[in-house]
Image: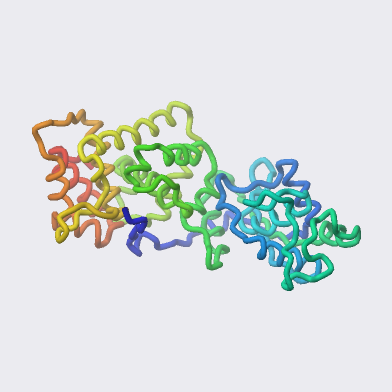
Amino acid sequence: MSNTITINEEELETYSNDDLFNITSWGADLSFRELAMMYDEGELLKPELQRKYVWTKKEASRFIDSVLLGLPIPSIFLAKQDDERMLIIDGYQRIMTIYDFMKGNKFQGDDKVFSLFNSDIINQRWRGKQFSELSLEEQRKIKSTTIHAIIFEQKHPQDDTGMYQIFERINTSGAALKPQEIRNCVYQGKFNSLLFELNKETSWRNMFGSEIEDQRMYDLELILRFFAISDLRNNPEKEQNSINLLKYLNNYMGKHRNLEENQEHIFRNNFMNMINLIKDILGENAFKRFDINKQSFVGRITPAAFDAISSATLYAKEKGFQKDSTKDYTSNYKNLLQNEQFIDSTSNRTTKVENIRKRISIASQILYGIDYEF
């Protein structure tokens, strides 16, 4: 099954509003000694399941070489939390490279203590050496080197969309964080943790088409989309002509950030009920596209089609739908994927509220014979 997920451009449209005025920022110069101490004492945090360490040993060694040579170091970005701890927005690779080297830890994915790359790209004075093998002067040089940190803080902690916009704007590198990766940084809490738990469910992984969780969190975002779009009929945004999907998903995560135990139970049950029902009626064809020429199911449906089918499935479950063993649900599914109105509403102006309602209604009627009330 293809790992490619095709997302309509309009669903990626960003936004800017007065929530940005809710953010203050200031600069501070922090030594690597201070940063290491903050990390050890739990005062410096990385986002939940932050993108893994990706530098090669050569890249990490070059960075330490630059520090020892006294070359300028790019700023890092931190976000001050309600409990005064600092969350790393940008700079995780730099901080952890120095931390592991200073602590004599094993290099990421290596079985040996971190030693600098032994080649001509590293100055011969410290080439191939561990931190403990450097001179005391060189060790002090690393510990005392300061890095400029730009620290962001929310004036009103309950408002998060401004912080999302800040994250989005400062992640301008070639490997910039994707929307769900940013949400993972901004909206940490029980709901975010629940998304990670559900993303590991075997039935979901089979339907997604990969046992390996997506590094850019596209699979996680689909689960969030399921919750948010299936619940649109209960939210004021349904009265709008169209929604800004990024903002709607952000607001939804912010609203449910700290789930109570009973709410968490409801969310979990809704997701598993949807997955189990769609699996029961469509089996391995669930959430796949139908190729007319090949007369077979291939790849993945678009996120907009996923939203519609998963929302219609949850709605059917809530209405007491029971599988009829005499019906051919696979044929119904093929008919749905070839329905012109369904294709149009999942391909064009997908963030228009009327099109969201239309595609869920069509999926509900064709798959389950149930009229969807929006």
Residue lying at the far top of the rendered structure:
262
Task: Indicate how the structure is coloured in the image.
Answer: rainbow
- Residue 47 drawn above or below residue 193: below
Against 186, residue 56 (above or below) is below
Residue depicted at x 55% and y 46%: 49
- Residue lying furthest left: 326
Query: Residue placed farthest to the right in the image?
Result: 136
In the image shown, does 32 or 61 lie closer to the viewer?
61
* Front residue of 221 and 278: 278
Q: Is residue 164 left or right of residue 225?
A: right
Q: As drawn, is 137 to the left or to the right of 45?
A: right
List x then y, in percent, for residue 330: 15, 43
**Residue 193 on image: x %, y %:** 50, 38
Picture residue at 46% right of the left edge, 37% below the top:
197
Residue 353, percent from left and from top? 27, 53
Q: Is residue 304 above or below residue 323?
A: below
Above or below 72: residue 198: above
Question: What residue is rendered at 45% in x and 47% in y?
Answer: 213
Left or right of 300 on screen, residue 26: right
132 or 149, which lies in front? 132
Query: Measured from the top left, where is residue 178 in percent x and y?
Result: 48, 58
Q: Quadrant of residue 226?
A: top left
Residue depicted at x 53% and y 68%: 174
Q: Nearer the viewer, residue 264 or 256?
A: 264
Q: Is 217 on the left-hand or right-hand side of 43?
A: left
Q: Is any atom of residue 354 visible in this view?
A: no
Q: Is residue 245 visible?
A: yes
User: Could you tell me which quadrant the C terminus lies in?
Assistant: top left
